[in-house]
Image: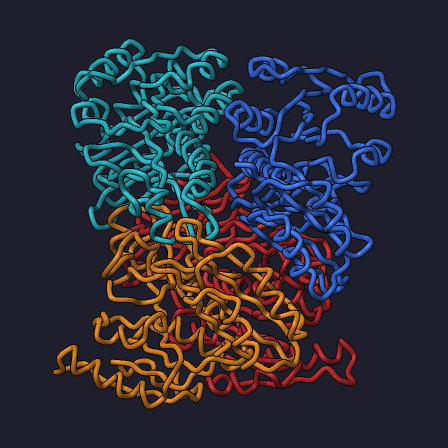
Chain colours: A red, B cyan, C blue, D orange
Amino acid sequence: MNRHRLLIDCTDNVGLVNQITGVLASHGVNILENDEFVERDENHFFMRTEFSGVFDSGKLYSDLAAVLPQNALINLTGKRKKNIVVLVTKEHHCLGDILIRHAFGDLDAQILAIISNHQNLRELSEQMRIPFHYISHENLTREKHEEMIIKQISQYNPEFIVLAKYMRILTPQFTSLFPNRIINIHHSFLPAFIGANPYKQAFMRGVKIIGATAHFVNHELDEGPIIAQDVVSVNHTNSAEEMARKGRDVEKIVLSKALNLVFEDRVMVNGNKTIVFE
Amino acid sequence: MNRHRLLIDCTDNVGLVNQITGVLASHGVNILENDEFVERDENHFFMRTEFSGVFDSGKLYSDLAAVLPQNALINLTGKRKKNIVVLVTKEHHCLGDILIRHAFGDLDAQILAIISNHQNLRELSEQMRIPFHYISHENLTREKHEEMIIKQISQYNPEFIVLAKYMRILTPQFTSLFPNRIINIHHSFLPAFIGANPYKQAFMRGVKIIGATAHFVNHELDEGPIIAQDVVSVNHTNSAEEMARKGRDVEKIVLSKALNLVFEDRVMVNGNKTIVFE
Amino acid sequence: MNRHRLLIDCTDNVGLVNQITGVLASHGVNILENDEFVERDENHFFMRTEFSGVFDSGKLYSDLAAVLPQNALINLTGKRKKNIVVLVTKEHHCLGDILIRHAFGDLDAQILAIISNHQNLRELSEQMRIPFHYISHENLTREKHEEMIIKQISQYNPEFIVLAKYMRILTPQFTSLFPNRIINIHHSFLPAFIGANPYKQAFMRGVKIIGATAHFVNHELDEGPIIAQDVVSVNHTNSAEEMARKGRDVEKIVLSKALNLVFEDRVMVNGNKTIVFE
Amino acid sequence: MNRHRLLIDCTDNVGLVNQITGVLASHGVNILENDEFVERDENHFFMRTEFSGVFDSGKLYSDLAAVLPQNALINLTGKRKKNIVVLVTKEHHCLGDILIRHAFGDLDAQILAIISNHQNLRELSEQMRIPFHYISHENLTREKHEEMIIKQISQYNPEFIVLAKYMRILTPQFTSLFPNRIINIHHSFLPAFIGANPYKQAFMRGVKIIGATAHFVNHELDEGPIIAQDVVSVNHTNSAEEMARKGRDVEKIVLSKALNLVFEDRVMVNGNKTIVFE
């Protein structure tokens, strides 16, 4: 079926849903799924519509623009897989989960390449037939290393960059190139345990639940818009290593869930927060 | 603020959202929250809208009827507390939770009376200043006992009847008087462990998770439309009694959650299933 | 049944379980439940045993002391309800939950009194027949106000003090009087959102899960040993107020769960962490 | 470190823990982790101990037998990976999860071979370098097909057989060959939705939570001892296919969790129930 997605992000006005659905009706398309949200404090309107039908997309776009506020962002896409590049360090669990999904069509994305500062995941990547690029950070400044990664990424021109346990902090120079297009999995229930070694922090604090957070990456470490979170119980018998082992299952499921939400165009960004139309 | 709720349930047509929102716009009301759902297999449309504004409700109703399919059910209400009667047997945890919420305005309902076939909960009910009616089932046929309860209920003319651990099975004669207006809490994760003593059943089966289910009551025991469910972990050290103790916390939270969803007009019934606009 | 609990906390030695169970066997008691934990990093041993039987408690105590390291803490108690005083401010949900459980014997405690700096919960307390003491903080220094509360508490000589949404920060002078005997419910998933207004903080951060934490209170705000935690999902449609409403159900269940763990002598404190023998 | 596991399963007697730990002490070994459980109704004792040290295993075994009841089952093993064979049909998610864990040493097992009645998972198996045997069931009686599978399995002599979404029902002839050694993942929250197509059943019933169950397989379909379960929320917008998609993440995590519990000798079977020493 010919399925399309329309995302609208603009100042709220009385009657917007009526006007938008009126335009869609005038083009004879059939709405399959529709969600809207109004952020009251900021008087801001967000809408996601899936519809089918044959239509003139240029005309639909201009008809929508005619009824929407001037600041409206209108995003109209046919349903298709997103192109992505995955960055990893040494840990295999998130990459493994993504690769298995990818191999069987469970991920709404095409993995173009995997880039790592270590060789540990080369074999898995090649077994699963994805190009693997090793870009060591040794003897390089952070800026020079990132420059090499960016150069490699740019050869693939991906729509999204997935940090599947990439354990180096990205500079603002890097992140500003890909606003709301870098997705990271952080191994804690943010904002608890920001920064390094969250399982060790969790163990030291004696928490009874640990978690994981998938989020867009912006200039501040672990401070970008949260897409998805989940948790798992722990207790006094769990060492920091056992917490990490339990946490890995949560990390991979949360990351893959967030990726599919993003790739299905279900996530809209509002400042430092997300609207997720599940 | 003058807040209204509109529920619509009808055959789906292309352009329904546009037509409904067009009618609302023509009355000058302001949509605050809007959810719709189309059941594809049955081509059926469900919509819940909250809006504010001053309008002529008779005119709004007839304008909506004019654009909707003939089978449309249109329900237009101002936001207000529902009138309810609560039936209980001996267990206090669900009734206690409801009474505390009621006393402090956390329940979107007015509890008119409590009816029980035992005296155990009289003291609590009276401490919380709700009329308590003791209608013993001893030496009565089931039909005669229900007749007495129905007579007592009818004095209060409630919109909903809440079975807060009422441990007797209702006859179809009873339930058919209150279609989709009786809400029960069942102490298992339905459809597992239908019928009597589900915690004993769960213990005997050796399950690792137990749960509770709030549902509308219809003619078949524990088979009505499910409104809400939740679970809690158990293990081999838990006796059937300990499972029951853990389960009670889930039961009361699930029942109160379901009640507020129903009382806020967020639950629509579709055959034996519910649409819940959270 | 005559049921006893033995708690032991000492440096770990090879053969401790054998020696302790040997002493118990020599007294002819019957072990019903037994849990032990060794903190490897600190080489520290924790044990909780429930047993039945008739025995000489002075002799048992001295026999245990003879086989245990010199630093051993030995706590031997018959199973009985703990005496507690509850401090509250204005919110009713945690107090209401505790009072209902108390009224029906579901809380392993005797509530001696309720103390508050506001009058809001007087009526509920009196309906449930618990003495209520209003000690306003108005026109008082923090120290003077605490002095008055301590004086009131001391008239009851409770074993534990429960902060059931008591919204004032206690001074070290207060908390040092009751080491590991004050239990607080914090309305966030600690260590996320320490301090004031955690639901507002959670809303501003755009988290997808919120939680609650029951913990012992020590000198640092929200930094004491965690006893129990739980979470609930939220999303972009939830205002800070709605998060607070969802959170209240988690708060009351987590607090009551923690209270029963403590009152059943299932919680041992190890520095800033707890061992919970569930 | 030289780490050993001792499992004991026998009638309960007063003083058993003392006698067992006495024997271990006399052999000079160091207990690292110890769990016991007494099933009161059946007066049955279960114990799992991990210890380190150098000892004479024949002597330890006979010394234990001397103090234990005659019906005692004593299982003493050094910690090592279990040998397994995995049976699959067409779905990749559970096998993929197991293979990734296996490749990086996260599964306490050696996968000797994969057997399937379809070719769908051959490529993945071979990419991950595990022998794959295709044994079609076409034109074969169930008995003949099982005979061929058993013959293939027996060439590997595995300790456990894992049904990672093997979608054919095994006959009692098959299951009786491997008592408590076949582990299955069932795609529902047992005992709800026993049998075929549980997601379709869940969709039709309108449940709000779905789940998965890992269990040993015995003669009755889906009736064997449950090892682990978990759940995930669904709602009215989810089709049966979407429930299946959500469910797959739960299935793979629950199966892998159960496998590691079994492979670490943490699961003891008591009739139709399990004792899980986590």
Q: Residue at x 56, y 69 (%)?
A: A162
Q: Which residue is drawn at 79% across and 38% down?
A: C179
Relative side of D120 to A194, left or right: left
Relative side of C273 to D6, left or right: right
Res B190 → quadrant: top left
Residue placed most toward the observer, B177 or D157: D157
Counting from the top left corner in percent of width and height, residue A265 is at 46, 59
Q: Relative to C138, is C219 above or below? A: below
Relative side of C120 to D219, left or right: right
Counting from the top left corner in percent of width and height, residue B111 is at 41, 17
**Which image quarter holds the N terminus of chain A?**
bottom left
Q: Residue at x 55, y 79 (%)?
A: D78
Q: How many labels does the image show?
A: 0
Residue placed most toward the observer, B31 or A137: A137
Q: Relative to C233, is C153 above or below? A: above
Counting from the top left corner in percent of width and height, residue C247 is at 57, 37
Counting from the top left corner in percent of width and height, residue C252 is at 57, 34
Residue placed most toward the observer, C14 or B237: C14
